[in-house]
């Protein structure tokens, strides 16, 4: 890499694992800490210190200093002659651009960072390919342009950020990101990738499918089609389709166990095989479909409850049961509940019984069979005290009946 002093790569920490990493390195009780070389130097020999406590001899450079309790003791006093290390870091590098993008290299240029307390020593560059877990890094001197070649390959998308560092180790915040996609060839007739698809949306969602739609890309020669990718939200992408249009219906994971994340994105491609920067991602719904309750069958009976006569303390009622089914009914039992304090004293054309407000009427032998669309009637006589309110619902052989 042009002007690059060192480079390295590392894995990105998965979301949710950072807290575990931090907690695993927490110091509790008695521990030790390495003293940086910048803090080591000539100090006063051991002897009585202020307050009558014996002074502690300085540790050798890089040695471990014991810590007692949950907090570390104060670092040694800065020795005379050491420059003042002000806390002010450099400013952020600005105007970062990719001035040249080739199959195996990316040239970056930027405006130099403003020094903080101290002179700028160089710049650190971090870059990675989206939808991947590997982060690359490179360090350069006090320059404003460099060419990155390590871990750069054809037809890949990369995101770059740059931070400044000064001579005492202060680092600035990272610059705004710069995203590029490398061509598939440096010598062919077409080395310019298409523009990124825009406004990717997901609609027409069913239990098993959803439709992706996006705005078309442009290209200096012509867009040949679009690659549709499924992304697991971590580090794995799968090409699911290559389509000539700006819509595609994707399959969704079946309930009840969808993945934690189920995302999609799109890249345009041209005739030379160049692919664009990826579109935005959309996330498929991961809610399970609630079970549906089957609709009850329609009633196959109709009941008419009609008072023939009523007086203070007594009543006579005729109940008519109609079979509205298409087949004869062989045997019947009708149940209903009084809404007042009625009590049955006698009945005819049915065997009746009462438990509390609930009345049960069963067929007698001669009216046991009711033809399709036929009916049967029975009568009851009873008493009441406070109310003779008629029932409002009836069930025939366990099924509800229409009233009236």
Image (tube, rainbow, N blue to C red):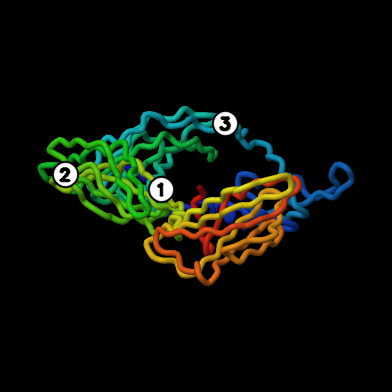
Residue 9 in sight here: no
Q: How many numbered discs sit on the rendered protein? A: 3
User: How far, Cα to Cα, is label 2 from label 3?
Assistant: 48 Å
Of all residues, the one furthest to the right in this rendering is 52
- Of marks 2 and 3, the one in the foreground: 2
- Residue 295 at x, y percent in the picture: 44, 55
As drawn, 165 above or below 209: above
As drawn, 173 above or below 326: above
* Front-lying residue, 398 or 68: 398
The quarter of the displayed image where residue 289 is located: bottom left
Q: Is residue 111 left or right of residue 114?
A: left
User: How far, Cα to Cα, is label 2 from label 1?
Assistant: 31 Å
Of the numbered discs 2 and 3, the one sitting upstream in the chain is 3
CB under 8 Å between discs 1 and 3? no
Of the numbered discs 2 and 1, the one sitting upstream in the chain is 1
* Front-lying residue, 355 or 109: 355
- Residue 356 at x, y percent in the picture: 71, 58
Q: Is residue 213 left or right of residue 55?
A: left
The quarter of the displayed image where residue 143 is located: top left
Q: Residue at x 22, y 46 (%)?
A: 226
- Residue 154 at x, y percent in the picture: 24, 50
Q: Residue at x 75, y 57 (%)?
A: 29
Q: Is residue 48 left or right of residue 317?
A: right
* Front-lying residue, 107 or 60: 107
Q: Is residue 198 left or right of residue 361?
A: left
Residue labelled with disc 3: 88
Of all residues, the one furthest to the bottom in this rendering is 365
Residue labelled with disc 1: 137
- Residue 203 at x, y percent in the picture: 34, 43
Residue labelled with disc 2: 270
Dot 3: within a 10 Å radius of its alpha carbon, few (fewer than 14), some, or many (20 or more) residues? few
């Amino acid at each position: 890499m042009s002007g690059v002093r060192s480079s390295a790569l590392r894995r990105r920490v998965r979301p949710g694992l950072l807290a575990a990493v931090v907690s695993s390195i927490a110091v509790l009780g008695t521990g030790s800490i390495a003293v940086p070389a910048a803090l080591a130097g000539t100090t006063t020999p051991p002897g009585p210190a202020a307050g009558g406590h014996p002074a502690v001899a300085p540790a050798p450079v890089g040695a471990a200093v014991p810590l007692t309790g949950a907090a570390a003791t104060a670092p040694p006093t800065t020795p005379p002659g050491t420059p003042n290390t002000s806390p002010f870091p450099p400013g952020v590098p600005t105007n970062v651009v990719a001035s040249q993008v080739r199959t195996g290299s990316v040239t970056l240029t930027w405006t130099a960072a403003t020094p903080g307390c101290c002179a700028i020593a160089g710049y650190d560059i971090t870059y990675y390919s989206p939808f991947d877990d590997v982060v690359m890094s490179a360090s350069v001197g006090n320059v404003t342009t460099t060419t990155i070649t390590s871990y750069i390959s054809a037809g890949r998308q990369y995101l770059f950020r740059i931070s400044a560092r000064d001579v005492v180790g202060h680092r600035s915040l990272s610059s705004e990101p710069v995203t590029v996609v490398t061509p598939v060839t440096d010598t062919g007739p077409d080395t310019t990738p298409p523009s990124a698809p825009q406004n990717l949306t997901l609609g027409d969602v069913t239990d098993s499918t959803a439709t992706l739609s996006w705005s078309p890309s442009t290209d200096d020669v012509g867009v040949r089609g679009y690659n549709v990718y499924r992304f697991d939200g971590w580090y794995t992408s799968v090409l699911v389709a290559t389509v000539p249009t700006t819509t595609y219906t994707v399959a969704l994971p079946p309930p009840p166990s969808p993945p934690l994340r189920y995302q999609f994105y799109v890249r345009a491609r041209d005739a030379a095989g160049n692919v664009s920067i990826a579109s935005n991602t959309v996330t498929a719904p991961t809610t399970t479909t609630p079970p549906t309750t089957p609709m009850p069958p329609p009633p196959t009976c109709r009941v008419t409850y009609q008072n023939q006569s009523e007086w203070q303390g007594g009543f006579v009622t005729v109940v008519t049961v109609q079979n509205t089914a298409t087949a004869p009914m062989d045997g019947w039992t009708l149940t209903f509940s009084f809404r007042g304090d009625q009590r049955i004293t006698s009945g005819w054309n049915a065997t009746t019984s009462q438990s509390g407000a609930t009345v049960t009427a069963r067929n007698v032998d001669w009216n046991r069979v009711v033809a399709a669309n036929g009916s049967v009637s029975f009568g009851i006589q009873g008493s009441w005290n406070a109310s003779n309110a008629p029932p409002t619902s009836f069930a025939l052989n366990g099924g509800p009946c229409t009233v009236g």
